[in-house]
């Protein structure tokens, strides 16, 4: 009898446990929070990350709110009913998490034309980055079963406790119910008591929160504009999906832990962030009007197609070493003296857009369309390549790859082109290749060229194929020129010297 009663009691308890398990909210053990609930010593630049058991869909309504726990005043709010930007709706996802643009290229450009900009550019999500306002951004980005919530920059402070509330419907996992977080199901965390010392010359960025900052932009915002001593921002291995923008900085080094494992990037282009007064907002990483910036041992990516820079770097005496840069049209945009060494630049056309001077040493360039559109004046040199490799990628332009099974046209991957730019010409454009290896470059090599050609320097010296055999230059564009040691020894020597190209600055010498 006692045994029968014990069995009945066990069955009742088991049924109760199973019932409670079915009613348990998804934000219990099924959802992992970062920062963890009630965690302390959190960096104020943290993102909010939720990991589900299944892939969540982003809702089109509801809010994410962050309150200061001390007096419960609202610190930040994201409204999911507001679209991210003027252009993302028509784009579709394609590996590797890049967007396909359905607008065809025009005969005079290898990048899609910018669409008509809506009259009101501010009816979208907006944030301020590096002091520049009106960037469109994605409030939530989902990869697999991980949803990252991007608060507005610089809204959290040191030595504060925060409460996060998320409305139901903001995120909708496929195979579970997510009720969000409210006053009854609290998500709280406390930030660090103080920032790094103002005198620090080395700052650590770590996406997992183990460093001085969680984001690259957080570290950039912290450093002074013109420090007396060089400051190194050491970036630990991880994925940093963020727009990075700064201007008028100097004496700053970005050093990655591992070139392939430090991935900094964002999906951005001239359709998502259309042209506005002031600096361009369409780039993934922008070092704007800055001096003595060093980028070393990391990867920079723009995940969208169109006019989409992976890197824009302008100013003077800037240095890029062992960096992989991936973008689409205008993948690399250079303005002012910059030295590249042992780096890789990958793009879809006009892969390098620049006004110079820029010196490339032992770099690899990959492009579907033209490798360059050079726009330097007679005030400085253009682009010079020493011991570099040019590889034409034999694919259709990405934004034409939207018709299943259709044969898409290829684009000629010439070394450089100089079309008439709405009445603007660049008669002093300069691109010089010395001891470079070429693959897939058409015989004509250069063009179309619509500019005044009287002062162009489109020069090559001893270009070869990948195996070192001399190329057939007999069909090169008549405006271009093949240098020879017999006639051009001094010119070859000068253009092999970075200091000659970069206005007297020798980046091979230590500071």
Image: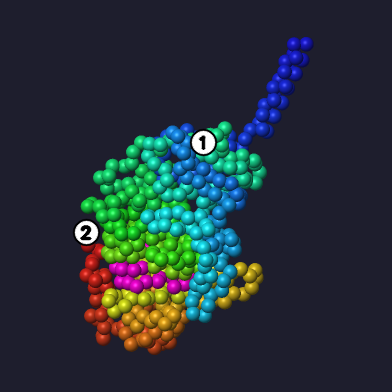
Which residue is located at x 32 percent, y 63 percent? 289
Colouring scheme applied when the structure was drawn? rainbow
Residue 49 percent location from the top left of the image: 51, 44
Number of marks: 2
Which element is circle 2 on? loop
Q: CA distance from mark 1 to mark 2?
A: 48 Å
Residue 187's tag is 1
Q: Which quadrant does the C terminus fall into?
A: bottom left
Residue 354 percent location from the top left of the image: 37, 71
Q: Which quadrant does the N terminus fall into?
A: top right
Which element is circle 1 on? strand
Residue 197 percent location from the top left of the image: 28, 42
| 259 shown above or below 12 | below
- Place residue 422 in its image quadrant: bottom left
Which residue is located at x 65 percent, y 68 percent? 404
Which residue is located at x 45 percent, y 67 percent? 275
Circle 1 Cα neighbour tier, 10 Å, few/some/many (<14 / 14–19 / ≥20):
many
Magenta stretch?
Answer: 334-358
Closer to us: 471 or 26: 26
Is residue 482 a member of the stretch shown in magenta?
no
Residue 347 percent location from the top left of the image: 46, 68
Residue 148's tag is none
The answer to whether any part of residue 287 appears in the image is yes
- Place residue 444 in its image quadrant: bottom left
Taking the image as shown, residue 500 lies to the left or right of residue 191, namely left
**Label 2 sits on residue:** 511
Is residue 337 a member of the stretch shown in magenta?
yes
- Place residue 14 in its image quadrant: top right
The answer to whether any part of residue 319 appears in the image is no
Q: Nearer the viewer, mark 1 or mark 2?
A: 1
């Amino acid at each position: 009898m006692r045994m029968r009663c014990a069995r009945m009691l066990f069955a009742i308890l088991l049924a109760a446990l199973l019932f409670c398990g079915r009613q348990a909210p998804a934000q219990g053990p099924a959802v992992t929070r970062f920062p963890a609930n009630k965690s302390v010593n959190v960096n104020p630049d943290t993102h909010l990350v939720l990991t589900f058991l299944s892939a969540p869909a982003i809702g089109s309504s509801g809010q994410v709110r962050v309150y200061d726990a001390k007096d419960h005043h609202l610190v930040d709010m994201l409204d999911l009913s507001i679209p991210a930007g003027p252009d993302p709706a028509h784009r579709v996802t394609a590996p590797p998490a890049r967007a396909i643009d359905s607008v065809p290229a025009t005969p005079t450009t290898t990048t899609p034309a910018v669409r008509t900009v809506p009259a009101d550019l501010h009816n979208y999500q907006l944030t301020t980055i590096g002091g520049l306002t009106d960037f469109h951004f994605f409030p939530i980005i989902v990869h697999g079963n991980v949803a990252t919530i991007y608060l507005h920059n610089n809204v959290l402070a040191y030595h504060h406790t925060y409460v996060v509330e998320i409305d139901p419907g903001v995120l909708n996992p496929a195979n579970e119910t997510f009720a969000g977080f409210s006053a009854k199901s609290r998500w709280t965390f406390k930030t660090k008591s103080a920032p790094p010392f103002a005198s620090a010359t080395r700052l650590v960025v770590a996406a997992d929160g183990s460093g001085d900052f969680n984001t690259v932009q957080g570290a950039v915002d912290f450093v002074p504009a013109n420090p007396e001593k060089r400051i190194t921002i050491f970036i630990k291995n991880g994925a940093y999906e963020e727009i990075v923008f700064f201007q008028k900085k100097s004496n700053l080094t970005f050093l990655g832990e591992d070139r392939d494992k430090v991935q900094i990037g964002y999906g951005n282009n001239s359709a998502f962030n259309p042209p506005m007064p002031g600096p361009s907002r369409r780039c993934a990483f922008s070092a704007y009007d800055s001096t003595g910036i060093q980028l070393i041992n990391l990867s920079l990516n723009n995940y969208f197609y169109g006019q989409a820079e992976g890197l824009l770097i302008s100013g003077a005496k800037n240095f890029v070493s062992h960096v992989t840069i991936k973008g689409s049209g205008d993948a690399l945009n250079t303005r002012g003296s910059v030295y590249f060494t042992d780096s890789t630049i990958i793009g879809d056309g006009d892969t390098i857009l620049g006004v110079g001077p820029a010196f490339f040493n032992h770099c690899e360039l990959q492009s579907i369309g033209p490798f360059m559109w050079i726009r330097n004046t007679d005030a400085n040199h253009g682009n010079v390549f020493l011991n570099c490799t040019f590889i034409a990628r034999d694919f259709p332009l990405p934004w034409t790859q939207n018709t299943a099974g259709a044969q898409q046209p290829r684009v000629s991957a010439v070394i450089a082109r100089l079309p008439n730019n709405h009445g603007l010409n660049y008669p002093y454009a300069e691109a010089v290749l010395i001891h470079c290896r070429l693959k897939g470059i058409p015989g004509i090599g250069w063009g179309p060229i619509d500019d005044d050609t009287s002062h162009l320097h489109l020069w090559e010296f001893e270009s070869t194929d990948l195996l070192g055999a001399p190329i057939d230059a007999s069909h090169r564009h008549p405006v271009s020129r093949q240098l020879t040691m017999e006639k051009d020894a001094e010119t070859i020597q000068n253009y092999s010297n970075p200091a000659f190209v970069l206005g007297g600055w020798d980046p091979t010498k230590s500071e």
